Amino acid sequence: MAKAIQAKVEPVTSEKVGEAIEATQPKFTKTQLVSSRKYIHRRDALNALLKDGEQYSFAQVDKILKTFDEG
C-alpha cells in the first residue's frame, strides 16, 4: 500500500500578501521622487523625510507622508 504524501500548507496571512504586493511594486530613489511630478508639492517634506541611498515605492512614500502630516 502506498503512503499518502502530505504537503505542509501554510496559511496565507494579510501580512504575507502585503509583502508580496510590496515586492512587485517599482521602487525609486529619493532624487527620483523629489523631482517627480507626482510629489511636486511635497518636495521639501520628501527631502527631509527620505534617506539618501534608499529606494521607496509610491505606497511607502504615501505612508511616510501621511504619518508626517498626522504629526
Image: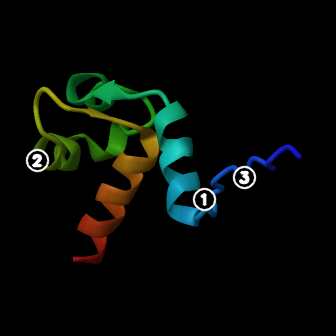
Locate residue 23 relative to residue 47 in the image: left or right.
Answer: right
Q: CA distance from mark 3 to mark 1?
A: 12 Å
Q: Which residue is mark 1?
A: 10
Location of residue 23 with respect to 3 vertically, above or below: above
Q: Residues within 10 Å of mark 1 (few under 14, many from 20)?
A: few
Locate residue 70 relative to residue 6 in the image: left or right.
Answer: left
- How far across and down, in percent of the image, does residue 52 sit? 10, 30
Q: Which residue is mark 2?
A: 48
Quadrant of the rendering where the C terminus is positioned? bottom left
- How far across and down, in percent of the image, does residue 39 sit? 38, 39
Q: Earlier in the sequence, mark 2 or mark 1?
A: 1
- How far across and down, in percent of the image, does residue 20 sit? 54, 43
- Tell me the tag on residue 6: 3
Q: Secondary structure at mark 1?
A: loop
Q: Amino acid at mark 1?
A: Glu
Badges 2 and 3: C-beta atoms under 8 Å apart? Answer: no
In this rendered view, identify the residue nearer to me: 1 or 16.
Answer: 1
Q: Residues within 10 Å of mark 2 (few under 14, many from 20)?
A: few
